[in-house]
Image (tube, rainbow, N blue to C red):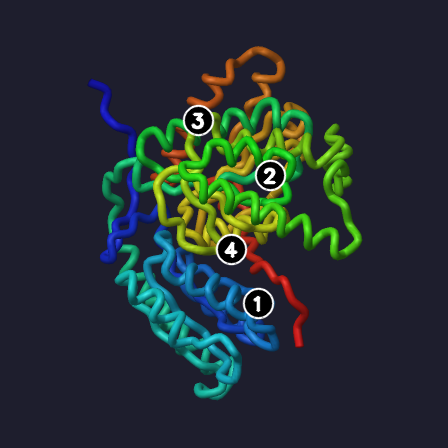
Amino acid sequence: MTPRPGFYGYRRAGGQVGTRNHVLVVPTVICASVVAERVAAAAPPLAVALPHLAGCGQLGPDMRITHDTLAAYCGHPNVGAVVVVALGCEQVIAQSLAEAARREGKPAEIVAIQAEGGTIRTTEKAGAIAQAFSGLLAAQEREWCDISDLVLSLKCGGSDYTSGLASNPALGRVTDRLVDLGGSAVLGEIAEIMGAEHLLAARAATAATGTQLIQVITRVETEARSLGLDIRGTQPSPGNIRGGLTTIEEKSLGATHKGGERAALEDVVGYAARIRRKGLTVMDTPGLDVESVTGMVGGGAQLVVFTTGLGTPTGNPVAPVIKITGNARTARQMADNTDLDVSGIMSDTETLDAAADRLFDLVLAVASGQETSAERLGHREFAIHRRNPTI
C-alpha cells in the first residue's frame, strides 16, 4: 500500500501546523515600522518584520481590514512567537494583536515606543525579547504531518500565453490532488476570475456558495464601472498584452486553471479571513500580486505557488513562495527567481502529469523546509489591501 504523502512541519500548541517557524515582529502602525525592522534584524534568522503603511487615519472598513490582517498574521501557523511594536497613539490596538497570537498558543509581548522613551530604548528592549523567542523556537523540531494539514495559496502574476497552457494547468492538477487527499487550497484575484466565474460557480458545493461568488464578481465589476472603467473585453495590464493575452476573459480562463478541474468550490471568504473548510476556497482579493498574496497568507495558507510567464521576484514575510514558469525564455532570463521550469509542456518534451508530479514533490519539499528562490533572495513583500481614502 502506498503511504500517504506528507511533510515535516511545526506543530503548534493550539493545533496549527506550520511550514516555517518565525518570530514575527509586528508594527501596529507605519510610524513603528522602522523600529520593527531593526528589532527583527537583531534576531536573525528566525525573526521577520511586517512593515506596512497603515494603522492610523483610516476609515472604518479599511481600519478593520488593517487590524484583521495584522491579527491574522499574528495567529498564522508559520509564526511561533510575536513581538508587537506599538507607537502608543494609533488606531490599531496592540493588545488585541498580542491576544490573537496567544489564542493560538504562541508567546507574545508588546513594546511601545512612546512608553519606552524612543527608538533606541524600544529597539533594545524588543530586540532582547525577539532574541529570547528565537532561542525558544530554535529548539523546536519538525514533525511528520499529513498532507491534509496543508493550505496552499494559488497565485499567478506577470502572466503570458504559457500561463494558461502550462504552469496554471500543472498547478491545477496539484490542487486537485491536494484536495483529493483532504488538503485545502485558496484562489484569489477576483478580477482575474471575471469572465470564467460561471465555471467555478458550477463547481460550488452549494447553491449559496456559487451565488456568493457571483455576487463578489458583480461587486468588483460595479466598483470598476463607478470609476468609468469597463474591464470586461479589455486587458488592463501592459505586461499581459506583451505576453500575448488579449482580454480579461482570456486571462481568467487561464487563471482559473490553478483551481483544478474537479475540486469543488467549498467557500467564498473576505480578505485575509480564516480559511474554514477543506477543499477549494475563493478569497475576495484584488489582482495586485502583493496585496493578493498578503490576503491569502493571512487566511492561513502556509505555502504559496506563484505561476508566472514574464517572471516576478515577489515573496512574503512568513510563507514560502514557489515560482513556476512555463516560458523557457523566462526560466533562463530569471533563473535566480525561478524554482520550477515546466516549459517542457510547451515544447512537448514533458507531459502535464509529469510536470504536476514534479511540482507536487516540490511543494512537499518546501513545506518541509527547503528554501525557495524568494526566501534565498530576501523577498518579503507585504501590503494590506486598502479600499478607502486616508483621513
Ranked by sequence position, the earlier of labels 1 and 2 is: 1
Q: CA distance from mark 3 to mark 4?
A: 25 Å
Q: From the image, which quarter does the C terminus lie in?
A: bottom right
The residue located at (49%, 21%) in the rendering is 355
**Residue reaching furthest top?**
348
The disc at residue 62 is 1
Q: Secondary structure at mark 4?
A: loop
Please say if the residues under marks 1 and 2 sit with CB atoms less than 8 Å apart. no
For disc 3, the neighbor class at 10 Å (few under 14, some 14 to 19, many from 20) is some
Q: CA distance from mark 1 to mark 4?
A: 11 Å
Q: Given the image, on which type of amino acid does mark 3 rest? A: Arg
Q: Given the image, on which type of amino acid does mark 1 rest? A: Asp
The disc at residue 271 is 4
The residue located at (57%, 76%) in the rendering is 56
Q: Give x and y (percent) for residue 148.
A: 30, 37
For disc 1, the neighbor class at 10 Å (few under 14, some 14 to 19, many from 20) is many
Q: Secondary structure at mark 2?
A: loop
Towards the viewer: 119 or 164: 164
Ranked by sequence position, the earlier of labels 3 and 4 is: 3
Q: Nearer the viewer, mark 3 or mark 4?
A: 3
The disc at residue 277 is none
Q: Secondary structure at mark 1?
A: helix
The disc at residue 193 is 2
Please say if the residues under marks 1 and 4 sit with CB atoms less than 8 Å apart. no
Ranked by sequence position, the earlier of labels 2 and 3 is: 2
